[in-house]
Amino acid sequence: MAPLEKGVLGKGLAIAETLRLNEHVNAEQKIKVARFLDLGIAALKSGYRNALYDYHFSDDPAPSSAAGKKTGCSAADIAAEIVSCSGCRLGKTRNRAVPGEGSEHPLVLVLGEGPGAEEDATGRPFVGPAGQLLDRMLASICLFREKNCFIANTVKCRPPGNRDPEFQEIRACAPFLIRQIEVLKPRLILAVGKVAANRLLHAGPGQNGDEESPPEPIGRLRGRFFDFAFPGSRGDSYPLSSAGDSGIRILATYHPSALLRDDSLKIPVFEDLKKLMLRLAALDEGYRQESRALMAKYAAKDPVFAAGAEEFLS
Ligand code: SF4
């Protein structure tokens, strides 16, 4: 670690310790400061500087009679922070940040890689040809972005030329993703593509501080359920430790843009989606009822699926 980063980290830890011992600062405020420090360190490591950026602080209003009532944080609050974020260099080249959209109480969080050209122009996720295919994929198992899904990306701003987001950019944007997962509380996360899958499964670049480690191929990660773990108790935003069971499961599959390039991937993706369907049916009674007719249709054609769906169809 460079001397500058060591110095910042040391000061950050000292501030964190002061906050930890200060009974007048509540947990929510401490978490905000810790996230701010995380972003600062990430910005230093990626070499990001913006002389125009300035911070404006004002005193909090005196506690009202509703003291202790949490102000809360919604997906819309996080989106408002994202659209004004300049936490990594993608903030300089984007047209519009893309926080994500969908239900505020989703069954499934669908997580992609980063915005493309159409998303960058509109500020909405998955609106190009790959997005239209994603909508059809989801509809095939009774999932809809406006009803029971939230659709977002690992990084919220478009990498120039549609390149993969870099390690530093993913790390800088990670706190937004973690907060979205905290607030949305999905039952399951569908990671489409290797970037999202590696990010959520703590695989690939950045693990154990090794930025050179290659990402796990999506072909090795897809089709299996994993547990999602929130950041460790030390407050690290990246790499994530495997502290605690969040109760949220992850399923990875191919990105829809890969399906547009290679038709043969549609078969394994549909197999993955049917696994997701069975898992959701086991988790949620409402979904089980809504998807019953489709399940029966798939069961009639697929004996393996029929065996899995038997308990939901009887
Ligand atoms: S990609 Fe994320 S961290 Fe970077 S500028 Fe956009 S919102 Fe901020």
Image (spheres, rainbow, N blue to C red):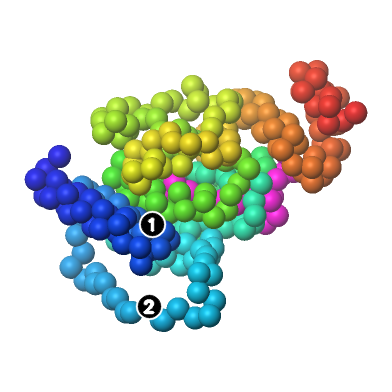
Left or right, 94 with reference to 196? left
> Dot 2 corresponds to which residue?
60
Residue pictured at 81% horizontal, 22% vertical: 306
Query: Looking at the picture, which amino acid does disc 2 mark?
Result: Asp
Placement of 75 over or under 165, stated as above or below? below
Q: Residue 19: say if magenta.
A: no
Helix, strand or loop at label 2? It is: loop
Residue 168 location in percent, x, y?
28, 45
Residue 106 vs residue 116, the one in the foreground: 106
Q: Residue 140: say if magenta.
A: yes
Residue 148 vs residue 9, the one in the foreground: 9
Residue 205 visible to the viewer = yes
Residue pictured at 32% horizontal, 55% vertical: 20
Residue pictured at 75% horizontal, 36% vertical: 281
Q: Is mark 2 within 8 Å of ligand 1?
A: no
Residue 151 location in percent, x, y?
57, 50
Residue pictured at 47% horizontal, 58% vertical: 98
Placement of 146 over or under 153, stated as above or below? below
Crowding around mark 1 (Cα neighbors within 10 Å: few <14, some 14 to 19, many 20+) is some
